[in-house]
Amino acid sequence: MTLKPFHTIGIGVAFSPNLVSNIYEASRLALFFDCKLLLIHVGEASEKKEKEIEEVLQPFITEQLSYQIVFKTGDPVEVILSATKTYNIDLLIIGALKRENLLKYYVGSIARKITRKAKCSILLLTKPSVQRVPCQHIVVNGLKDPRTQEAISAAFFVANKLGSNKITVVEEITKQQVAVSVEDHRSLRKANIVKERLVLREDSRVKKIIAEIPQEYKDSVLVKTQPIFGKRGYSIGHYAEVVRADLLVMNAPLKMSFWDRLFPHDIEYILTELPTDVLIVQ
Amino acid sequence: MSPRKNNIKTFFNQLPRNIFSGFVVSLISLPLGLGLAMASEAPPIAGVITAIVSGLVVSILGGSHVTITGPGNGMVGVTLVAITALGLNGAYAAIICSGLVMIALGFLKLGKLSDFFPSSAIQGMLAAIGLIILGKQFHIMLAHKIQRTDAMDYLIEIPVTINDALHYERKGLIFAAIIGVVSLVIMVIYPKLRNKYLQLIPAPMWIVLLSIGFSYYFELVLHEDNPISKSYMVSGIPHFNEIITQIPTVDFSQLGSVPFWSSVLALTLIASIESLLSIKAVDKLDPENRRSNVNKDLKALGVASIGSGFLGGLNVVTVIARSSVNVNNGGSNTSSNFFHAFFLVIFIVLFSTQLTRVPLPALMAILVFTGYKLASPTVIRNIVFIGKEQLIIFFVTLFVTLKIGLITGIISGVITTLIIHIIINKSFMLFVRNLMKPNVLMYKEDNGNYYVSVKHFCSFLNYYKLKEKLDAIPPQCDVIVDFSLCNFVDHTVMENLNGYQDMFTKNDGHFEIVGLDTYKADSEHPLAIRRKLSGTRLFGRHLTKRQSQLQTIAEDFSLGYNPTKCKDTLFLKDFLFFKTKQINHIYNRLFNDIHSINLFDIEFSEGEFIAKEVVRTTMLHIDLENEVPIFTLDREGFLEKVYALAGFKDIPIQDHDDFSKRFYLLGEDVEGITSFFNDELVLFFESNPYYHIESNGKSLLIFSKERLASIKELKALLDFGKRLQKTID
């Protein structure tokens, strides 16, 4: 079995100060992953724009990057979403915004809508840069979810392609799972026994998933599992921030209703404060 | 099921000393109960009924271990308002309803309620309660009954009352005022007297006993009437059978009115907060380091309040001073609370007529002292030390509580705190945006440490999230709390973390706070803990006479000398002596080059609140080369014989009857101790002066008196220690 989750990488191109660094990041990834790069610009097609983009792409074209530039007018959200469908994009790259004066990143409103509705995997970049920043440590979620396996194998694929040396699989254990509220020294002891048991159970589940990953992907990376206690979806971001991970890989949420946005959970937390680069695997 | 059997066995083994401590607690509970009830303008017996019902109910249903329950100081203000607004029988109905609400709080697991209030606001509220008690009772203490509507007016008129008291002409009033002043003096001086026989009876009981004796002196010796005016004597103490037959009819007719429910709300809020704070403080005193189940306790207090309300008693709360007396007298489980109630029943059955011989000013002096302790200048000084902004919160709460009421007072304290936090951070959004976020992450690192990281901000608003995580960590573990991703940490949180630090240290765990150094705004909002931890201040530029003498000794015996306060007293925590005491600091340290011999002055405290005694003494700590059994050795006296009855066993050493008779030897490893006390060592102890000697297995702690040693005594202590070390090693 070989892992190859991505074939076509898409990126929205706007003529902003981040243009060069965004394109550089996307092209580098396309080369690493051996993918086709699709650059989508929302607006009228023009020779001048195409020239400008190609100029930026020049160093990568010499490295045999296969790319395509698409111009389309309309609502940015609609345009990008329809492009992902028509061109079979399976990884969409989106740049995050930085909160003024603070070292905090969040996803803008348009990008957030795309993230919620897209049917493909999404990579949210916090600090796109022209120079390559090596990706050393990848944190991936190990939730009990049918799609966790995909997320973990995607993490191994990325680690292998980008030469990362460490993957931490994080199991989030919620208060509801422990189900014993600590009130005195007796219930404290009981809660800790329950926790130990949960940790062992989660650990063996995750180990089973990791066992199915082809050995060649595991050779060069250090794999660690880490149970954490906190709110699902939020605490993993907090953890990634604490351990200074370079990439956080997560499952895509199952579905989003009105209530999910009002009472944010899982992925929504991550979107309001990006701890690092985030890959949402569909 | 052997552990269960063991529990029953230890329960019966410990029963005698629980009965003993229950008895001592009942001695303080009786006068306090009478006084608190009268201060609330309820019949005096209501306080005793409260204590009896609560002791019987909470000891069986409660979730804590060494707490004592009964009528509380904090309740005086609110109960007073309830009785004024609803009448006595209406107030009983409000007390019953507040009991119901407390049960509901317990079931909703709202034991964390007290964590939602900023600690300076709570301090302000308690100080206001203290001033309400002090203001009102001060006049009665000086035999000058006045009736005012505003709590402030009572305080303002204190000088007038003093002036009046100095010019009394009626004999009855003069005697009443003198009794009041003498009682107050007893309350103040008592903690400073360290006589173990005198200390056996708590100060409030001394006041009761002395005033009853005073009345008998006039009746039996002088054959005169008691000179104290009749109107200043405790009245309306019914016989025991009258209490049973004259149960008040509870008046539920005001159930639909607003004042009724605002009284219920105030009673519940204050009862819960006072109980929760007390439970938290008493848990720190528990020698067995157990953790109380606060929700279970709330339910039990609720049930007890309902019972108490129906029988003509007041709200039941957990009380700090009486609980600390319980711990200090060897109370080890809930049965001491039960026996405290039991002895109160006996007192009322046997002596209720004697209680009418107690003058009011004497009881009120106890309350004045209680009130003063709640609002004492030390409280304010500690707050100033933490930060000026805390002082604003404190005084806003204090004045609003005095002027308007308790509920408004505490709400204003919360709002002030919030406003101050927003101003300090120059950001409103920091709080709004992050309030609901689950900002605490906890995980176990590979080496077994627990790591807790806190994001955004951590203040009284969201402290419960951090608390929930910290509570789930076994206290024997190592914990690191990291605030480096956090923009703001408030005083309430720091104070609570300080409590956790104590708890973990006591249980051989380790609790460390990191990431505070990165704070930009440090100078703008100094955090209490940072000041506290670095609080090793010099005593002043000049050494006292004793200190310069110590310095000379250090030079003569080539020892090192350091006069500064030192908070690092971890090496003392294993000693049995400090199990129920809190060490404040050590100072004036004399030590040899390898620090194996340490001679120091130490300040520690025993008990809490009005039963708090701060003790300064000189101790010698010697590290031993070889392991020795854990033991305590002291001179045998009358009290030790009483303790022996209460279940503390003296270990006899064979063939040394004289030694066994003169010394009192305690320890668990009986065999190890008997073989350790060989002929040579016994002879050494017999031929030297008495000291209190304790071993924790690795080192010895030696001291003689519970006061600072003079230079001569200090030299003798040092010499004794050195020779003892030689004999043992």
Image: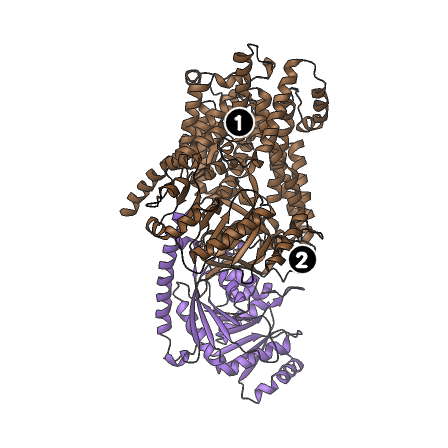
Chain colours: A purple, B brown
Quadrant of the image for the C terminus of chain B? bottom left
Residue A108 lies in what quarter of the image? bottom right
Q: Residues within 10 Å of mark 2 (few under 14, many from 20)?
A: few
> Which is more N-terminal, label 1 or label 2?
1
Residue B459 in picture, x, y percent from top left? 59, 51
Residue hosting label 2 = B522
Amino acid type of the residue tagged 2 in the rendering: Asp
Q: How crowded is mark 1: few (under 14 residues within 10 Å), some or many (20 or more)?
A: many
Q: In this view, does B626 lie to the left or right of B369?
A: left
Q: Are marks 2 and 1 on the same chain?
A: yes
Which sits in the foreground, B333 or B256?
A: B333
Which sits in the foreground, B674 or B630?
A: B674
User: Which numbered disc covers residue B193?
Assistant: none
Residue B554 in picture, x, y percent from top left? 61, 56
Residue hosting label 1 = B206
Residue B714 in picture, x, y percent from top left? 57, 49
Amino acid type of the residue tagged 1 in the rendering: Trp
Residue A76 lies in what quarter of the image? bottom right
Q: Is residue B110 above or below residue B449?
A: above
